[in-house]
């Protein structure tokens, strides 16, 4: 049995806000509860509600810029920068800029809708 797995067909998460989410490893693709790795593209003007997830989230910006509001502090990352946001921290993600933002997101343990705790 091989000791590696090459992901050739990531799960494309259905969205209604124009955001592209391709989960390469995680609950939806490999049933891995420990980590999720996703490639994402957030269109200009995109945002999502505040959340207080039960996982640490690491974000690496490939192209463009992404805005984070973390405990009422606004942080903007650009290509080549990364951030770790600790679990149970109130955060909002957005792209209020004119260009798409392409990035990688890694969550430990893996992302799930039950553990993200998005506000309505």
Image (cartoon, rainbow, N blue to C red):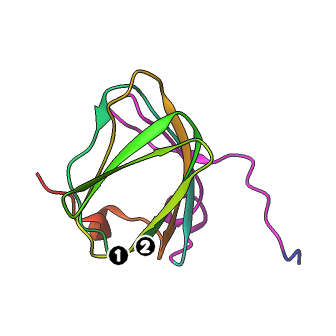
Residue 12 visible: yes
Find residue 2 and report its image quarter. Answer: bottom right
Q: Residue furthest top?
A: 98
Decide whether residue 13 is among the magenta residues: yes
Across and down, in percent, residue 54 comes to 32, 75
Residue named by callout 1: 87
**Who comes first in sequence, dot 2 or dot 1?**
2
**What range is drawn magenta here?**
4-33
Q: Secondary structure at mark 1?
A: loop
Q: Residue at x 31, y 61 (%)?
A: 113
Q: Residue furthest right?
A: 1
Q: Residue at x 31, y 27 (%)?
A: 45
Return the residue nearer the eye: 106 or 21.
106
Is the C-beta separation of discs 2 and 1 under 8 Å? yes
Q: Which mark is residue 56?
A: 2
Horizontal side, residue 55 vs residue 101: left or right = left
Q: Residue at x 42, y 65 (%)?
A: 111
Return the residue nearer the eye: 15 or 66.
66
């Amino acid at each position: 049995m091989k000791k590696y797995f090459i992901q050739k067909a990531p799960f494309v998460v259905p969205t209604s806000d124009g955001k592209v989410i391709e989960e390469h490893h995680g609950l939806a693709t490999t049933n891995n509860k420990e980590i999720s790795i996703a490639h994402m593209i957030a269109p200009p003007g995109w945002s999502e509600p505040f959340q207080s997830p039960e996982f640490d989230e690491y974000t690496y910006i490939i192209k463009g810029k992404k805005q984070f509001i973390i405990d009422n502090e606004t942080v903007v990352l650009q290509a080549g920068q990364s951030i770790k946001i600790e679990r149970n921290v109130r955060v909002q993600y957005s792209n209020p800029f004119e260009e798409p933002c392409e990035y990688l997101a890694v969550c430990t343990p893996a992302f799930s809708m039950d553990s993200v705790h998005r506000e309505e």
